[in-house]
Image: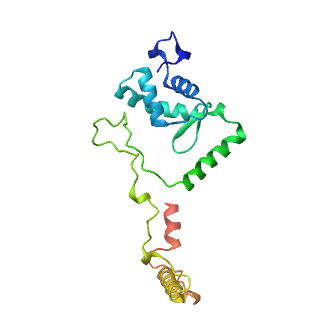
């Protein structure tokens, strides 16, 4: 892929953010890109190795978020802010969310990830986690039945028992305090001060 914007410039002098902007401008408004696809195209254009891209990735992602000319469109898709009027941005994101709800999710083709080459310890975040499914059911023993008065009664009794451990019920009675202490008296303190 050749980008006319950079004709005559050294590819080694270009930043990833400049190339990302040029790629998105070349593709046009209705061709937003997934982050991984955008990074792969940048890597191909700049002819950088996987290790170079992997090293520059955190800075690039930060710049992508901070730079005002890019806009996240949900599902890790990115576009140029100039493509959308201010009012249209919210509508576009809402439309994308509504489309997700209407169509059943299809299994995506396994994409080649330039950042995973042979690293067995790397975590592949593109795989769906079975715990994220809606089929998760809470443990019925942990649920609270509002209609069952026995639950409320036992809960109140347990609460009262805990309170009584901290402050016994007989606090209403007056307690007599003996102000004279056989081991220590005010006279001793006065005597120590004089010395």
- Residue 160, position in %: x, y? 52, 84
In this rendering, is residue 185 above or below 121?
A: below
- For the residue pair 75 and 154, the one nearer the viewer reads as 75
What residue is shown at x 49% (from left), y 86% (from top)?
154
In this rendering, is residue 141 above or below 21?
A: below
Q: Quadrant of residue 179?
A: bottom right
Count every numbered label the image shows and give the total: 0
What residue is shown at x 62% (from left), y 31% (from top)?
68
- Residue 124, position in %: x, y? 36, 44
In this rendering, is residue 9 above or below 1?
A: above
Relative side of 149 to 83, left or right: left
What residue is shown at x 36% (from left), y 35% (from top)?
115
- Residue 21, position in %: x, y? 56, 26
Here the colouring is rainbow
- Residue 7, position in %: x, y? 52, 12
Relative side of 107 to 23, left or right: left
């Amino acid at each position: 892929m050749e980008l006319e914007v950079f004709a005559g410039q050294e590819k080694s002098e270009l930043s990833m953010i400049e190339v990302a902007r040029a790629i998105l401008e070349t593709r046009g408004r209705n061709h937003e890109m997934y982050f991984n696809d955008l990074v792969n195209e940048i890597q191909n254009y700049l002819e950088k190795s996987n290790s170079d891209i992997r090293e520059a990735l955190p800075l690039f992602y930060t710049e992508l978020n901070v730079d005002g000319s890019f806009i996240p469109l949900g599902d890790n898709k990115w576009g140029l802010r100039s493509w959308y009027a201010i009012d249209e941005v919210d509508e576009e994101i809402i439309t994308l969310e509504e489309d997700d709800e209407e169509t059943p999710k299809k299994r995506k083709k396994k994409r080649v990830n330039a950042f995973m080459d042979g690293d067995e310890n790397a975590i592949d975040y593109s795989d769906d986690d079975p715990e994220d499914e809606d089929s998760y059911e809470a443990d019925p023993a942990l649920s609270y039945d509002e209609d069952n008065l026995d639950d409320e009664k036992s809960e109140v009794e347990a609460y009262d028992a805990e309170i009584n451990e901290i402050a016994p019920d007989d606090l209403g009675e007056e307690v007599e305090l003996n102000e004279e202490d056989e081991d220590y008296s005010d006279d001793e303190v006065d005597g120590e001060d004089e010395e």
